[in-house]
Image: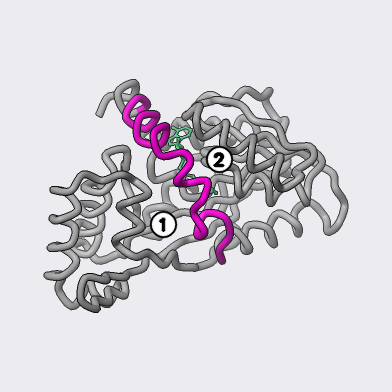
Amino acid sequence: MPQREQASVTRRQFGERAKAYASSALHSRDESLEMMERMAREHLGGGVRAGTVVDVGCGAGFTAAAMSALAGRVLATDLTPEMVEQARLVGRERNATGMTVAIAAASSLPLGSGAVDVLTCRYAFHHMADAERVLGEFRRVLKDDACFLLADTVATEDADVYAWMDRVERLRDPSHHLNRSPSELVGLIEGCGFRVTEQGEARVYLDLESWVQRSATPAAEVGELRRLLMEAGAGVREAFEVDQRGDDIRFSWPVMVVKAVKR
Ligand SMILES: C[S@@+](CC[C@H](N)C(=O)[O-])C[C@H]1O[C@@H](n2cnc3c(N)ncnc32)[C@H](O)[C@@H]1O
């Protein structure tokens, strides 16, 4: 999809559903966010509230608000104006002093070169079609001794499982771009001038009903998603922990948390 079209699909998708994301328990706090907090705390030097963090694809602002307990200045940025507004409200509710917000594409951040100590990006990178450009922009805004913390859902290394996940994600949300395999994600980051220094694994636990409600997926696509999950083969069921009890279908996506530094 051309870049401009991708941006407007993303804005439409998330603009209409910003409030649903702001009340999502899994976005509010999970294992991936705890891992990012630990990595950021170590990088920023313990309890010292110093440094500048930028959170990219901030959504409803949960990662940015968490970072504001660790850093003096946090800028939460997102392409979707309605999401930025939710981030502003979440920051205020959580008393995130030092947190400001801005509407910005990940590939064009409103920051000077070498301005940032930690850049975070959680559950947003798989929506970004211009991944190399985005990583180049991340590298530009980071100081030489800064770090980049990424948490994102990933596929597996198995080609069939990978293709199944891609089909399911796209059916649910047309702004989805690509869930890479762990080796592909690390290769991409390292190919864009970073060195990965730490990798962690987590999972995001989903149930079909609330997952499609949050994204306002149309009924026909929901029916197809239900069929794909119910008829999934053993490899997919195992990789994504598919568990069906009557109409209730639960599954989980693997999540990768990566710390990278500039090479
Ligand atoms: C699932 S939400 C992010 C959740 C959030 N980071 C958190 O920790 O709760 C994905 C966000 O990515 C944003 N997004 C997608 N593509 C983007 C891009 N190219 N530049 C900036 N934001 C983007 C969307 O607008 C959406 O708000």
**The label number, if any, that marks residue 153 in the structure image:** 1
Residue furthest to the right in view is 48
Front-lying residue, 20 or 252? 20
**Residue 76 x, y percent position in the rendering:** 63, 36
Q: Are marks 1 and 2 in contact (CB under 8 Å)?
A: no
Front-lying residue, 262 or 108? 108
Which structural element holds mark 1?
strand
**Residue named by callout 2:** 58
**Residue 192 x, y percent position in the rendering:** 49, 40
Mark 1 and mark 2 lie on one chain; the one further toward the N terminus is: 2
Relative to 228, is 177 on the left or the right?
A: right
Main secondary structure type of the part rendered in magenta? helix
Note whether 255 is above or below 70 in the view shown.
below
State the CA–CA distance, disc 1 to disc 2: 15 Å
Residue neighbourhood size for the residue with mark 2, other residues' Cα within 10 Å, grouped as few (<14), some (14–19), many (≥20): many
How many labels sit on residues? 2
Relative to 30, is 145 on the left or the right?
A: right
**Residue 133 x, y percent position in the rendering:** 45, 30
Q: Quadrant of residue 96?
A: top right
Relative to 31, is 206 on the left or the right?
A: left
- Residue 8 magenta-highlighted: yes
Front-lying residue, 199 or 17? 17
Front-lying residue, 254 or 100? 100
Mark 2 beta carbon near ligand 1 (under 8 Å): yes
Which residues, given as a range, are shown in magenta? Answer: 7-31
Q: Residue at x 67, y 25 (%)?
A: 113
- Residue 124 magenta-highlighted: no
